Image (cartoon, helix red, strand yellow):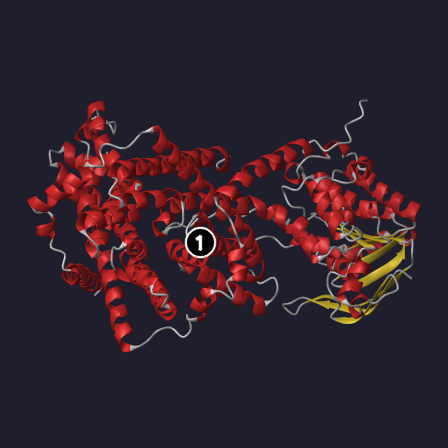
Amino acid sequence: MTLRLTQAGLQHRDGSHALRGVDLSIEAGERVAIIGPSGAGKSSLLNLLGTARPPSSGRLEVLGRQPWQLSGRQRQKLRTHIGLIHQAPPLPPRQRVVTAVLAGKLGQWGLAKSLLNLLYPLDIPGARGQLAKLDLADKLFAQCQQLSGGQLQRVGIARVLYQAPELLLADEPVSAMDPVLADHTLSVLCRHAGEHGVTLVASLHTVELALAHFPRVIGLREGRIVFDRPAAEVDRGLLDALYANEQLLPPAPPHIGATAVQIPRC
Amino acid sequence: MKRLLDAGLLLALLAAVIAAFAYLRIDLGALTGSENLGHMGDYARRFLSPDLSAGHLGAIGKGALETLAMSAVGTLLSAVFGLLLALPASGRFGWAAANPARLLLNALRAIPELVWAALMVFAAGLGPNAGTLALALHTTGVLGRLFAEALENTPQAPAQAIRLQGGGAVLAFVYGTLPILWPQLLAYSLYRWENNIRMASVLGFVGAGGLGQMLYVHLSLFQEAQASSVIIAMLALVFAVDALSGWSRQRWVKA
Amino acid sequence: MLKTAERDPAALPRLLIALLAIVLLWPGVRLSELDLGVFLQSGSSEVGRFLAGFWPPARDAEFLQILLDATLQTLAIATAGMTLALLIALPASLIASRALSLSAAVRGGQPLWWAQLLRWPVRGLLIFLRSVPEIVWALLFVRAVGLGPTAGVLAIAITYSGMLGKVYAEIFESVDQRPAHALMQAGSGRLAAFLYGVLPNAAAEMLSYSVYRWECAIRASVVMGFVGAGGLGQQIDLSLRMFAGSEVASILLTFFVLVLLADLLSRLLRGRLG
């Protein structure tokens, strides 16, 4: 059992519930898509599974351990086996793509090796290999600020592929790509998961992609699981109920940039 | 009502000015009297023929290099220590660490360079080492505070992402925070360096090396010709730094 | 397809920059005679005893009287120096500024070339006055008029007239030129045009900058005391020479309070007048 949630809930700071009473279990090597209207709690669920936040109620088990019962050091060790792909990968604008990708293994490398890697990239072929799978090898030495949103998403995916975790969580990994590229990128992710026996959980806003690439689909709405069944059994009626009255509110991408330099006088 | 208050304020300012002159008992009449002006004119005239002999120019060159070295090493040290103090001061290690760090930074910053230099001359003896340490101490306070503010305003998400994949706190900082931060750190440090070059040229007045010490010695020995060329060298240094910083700012910061 | 290089293209530039930094840093450290050991060995030596003397700060009545005197002197030096600086800076800025050019008023903002040429000596003088650091002026005046606050007042007057003159001239040029030009084209004198056309718009900014400079003058007057120009600085110098740590501590505390109060007052005044 890779993932197990028992009656898990997550509460925001303002007191509103992002998730309530979620029961979920995912076997090792499964590929699961999470769909649902925006604001349904997809990101919250992935953050919970990725141990970014502790559940405010219920129980969470990841890779056979309860991360929030562990010591800080052990939790960090557990986290090296979890890869989280962000919708807008938080990469420093001036960091080079090669460094951003190689940063995937920071949890496994020692301190000395990691610091040395900052001065001279230690595994250029490794980084190039992951980027090549995503047709981005030519951007190896570019700065992140020179890339488009879709290219940045692929750099984020390359970083997690390079990390080679046992559990791969992806939060809207292809939202900024055109349909053909999104399809190709998802195939790469799924192929990687299949070849290495990696558990893959991805939230997607495109139902067609979810049904095409994932054997199991979970529908989420207002912080609760509405359905959880094989892709073949998901029909029009289920989807209509899931997306009823959706307001289209695109999430604002986080802004990462240096603030203006203000210099005092006297 | 507001007009009345403003008028009162202006009156208070006027009273303060009169009180200041009265307290100091400065006799502007005597100061600008013909005898005194003549005396000052004589004194000023002795500066009009600067000593430009090769030996003296060589000494000035060495003094200028010493001034530059003091400012550069002092700024570099303060950038390192400033960053080390900025980390706790920005609240990264909790409030218990933040308040002492901020207090230390404020104290370092509040004492002017020249006072630090006087203290350091006392502790380390005459010479450029005292000046370097004095600049480093004061500038650590200034840069530390600026760095702490920059740190607080830096997005946390990249560092958080590194933490979430198992990286340690140090690595999260150097991979997730520093790449966003360093252009700002560099800009602040260069700006302070510019300031410190000016400061380093006068720290010598209390014995802390560089051009200032030369000027002080020559003036004490009533060698106005030599002092005059040192002042010209100081001016040249200041103009060169101004021109260079103006040029580099236009070239890099605007883009 | 060509196999792309498996080497980092940034490696060579980085290596060169690092080498350059080391090559520059080494003579820098030698020239500055850097020795951080001072802080480590100070515990046992005389310095340690001196620093231990900092607490408690001196507070006997006699010393407090001296301290009060020095504080008032510092304030008076800053205020008197600023006043003299204003008296020099105002006329100088009027000459240096293009805002009151008669030729510019009738030529659509562009003054005649020879009128422009006349401004340069004044501008050059202002640059010279502010480029020599105030403490150098103080040292020179101490030699010329003797030890004491007069040297400090004159040094502040000279340096700050250069700074104020430049900034005032810039402020005059930055405000709307049309009222002054209209007045001059209608035949009024330059001074009248300035008083009625420029000053009303520029006054707030000028006041705000002057108050801010006054605050800087307080700091400067403390520093100038080290070369004998009176005030708190001279007192610190004296106490240091006498190894009186507790007195140094008291003076430094007074200095902090003074700077803090000046900052508050300056903010208050700028808020009210600005």
Left or right: residue B176 versus residue C121 is right
Left or right: residue C208 versus residue A118 is left
Q: Is residue C13 above or below residue C55?
A: above
What amino acid does circle 1 point to?
Ala
Q: Residue at x 23, y 67 (%)?
A: C69
| Residue A224 in view in this figure | no
Q: Which residue is the site of mark 1?
A: B134
The N terminus of chain B - image quarter: bottom left
Q: Residue at x 15, y 32 (%)?
A: C185
Q: Residue at x 74, y 55 (%)?
A: B167
Residue C203 point in image, percent of width and height = 23, 49
> The residue marked by circle 1 belongs to what chain?
B
- In terms of depth relative to the viewer, which is nearer, C169 or B218? B218
Left or right: residue A62 versus residue A38 is right
Residue C147 point in image, percent of width and height = 21, 55
Residue A53 point in image, percent of width and height = 73, 63
Q: Image quarter for residue B215?
A: top left
